[in-house]
Amino acid sequence: MQVIGWMNRRDFSLHGLFAAVAAGAVGSSAWAQAPAAPAPERPLVLVVGDSLSAEYGLKRGDGWVPLLQKRLAEQKVKAGVVNASISGDTTSGGRARLPGLLAQHKPDIVVLELGANDALRGLPLPSTEDNLTQMARASQAAGAKVLLVGIQVPPNYGTDYTRRFGEVFPKVAAATKSALVPFLLKNVADAPDAASLFQADRIHPLAVAQPRMLDNVWPELRKLIQAAR
């Protein structure tokens, strides 16, 4: 399998935190209030991931999560999507953030796309496995179904580490009875045209690769959406 730069760099860090800034205007009346936000579409999908889901280096709307929203609309599948992904996040960071996200959004489905930064920073695999397990269980305890989205590391990490890291995601999925996407970057990092699918940093996929990433997630996610309706 040919895997290009983003998986071959040990100094890699999925970094860059995107902030959304909202501006509002105060009406003439001191008692004026903003209209209440509409209730989110149900079932609600909460995506908790890193820069691979946070549109790092992409124009807003080009990432696989916004493309998911478009696909839902095109196929007339009623479901809402909240993208709570943060560039550079690890499984420990996601685990720390998750309780607040569950309380705020009350999702029906939680997509966990974390783990790449753990491997690329050399964090202990037992910690990665425990963090993902606890996140899946916390989501399920809150009433949500879980989709675990896996990632892979290249052979230059060593045969043993590569194998053990690859086993983390199916092991957690089996232990928590969660749905599983084995490899988010299937047909991207291992594609014949892989070099043309990544940004100049050779780490983050270009917009042209995002539909392939969505296609990897879509079959399992659609099953969960249909089951939650």
Image (cartoon, rainbow, N blue to C red):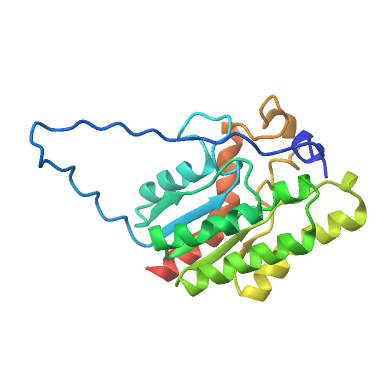
Regarding residue 193, the answer to whether it shows in the image is: no
**In the rendered image of this protein, does residue 215 appear above or below residue 99?**
above
Q: Quadrant of the N terminus?
A: top right
| Outermost left residue | 29
Q: Residue 23 placed where, x, y %?
A: 30, 31
Q: Nearer the viewer, residue 134 or 192?
A: 134
Q: Residue 58 placed where, x, y %?
A: 54, 30
State left or right for residue 59 relative to residue 148.
left
Q: Quadrant of the C terminus?
A: bottom left
Identify the image quadrant of residue 220.
bottom right
| Outermost front residue | 30
Q: Residue 100 placed where, x, y %?
A: 46, 58
Q: Nearer the viewer, residue 136 or 21?
A: 21
Regarding residue 166, the answer to whether it shows in the image is: yes
Identify the image quadrant of residue 138.
bottom right
Q: Residue at x 70, y 62 (%)?
A: 169
Identify the image quadrant of residue 187.
top right
Q: Residue 115 placed where, x, y %?
A: 69, 53
Q: Residue at x 34, y 34 (%)?
A: 22
Q: Residue at x 39, y 33 (%)?
A: 21
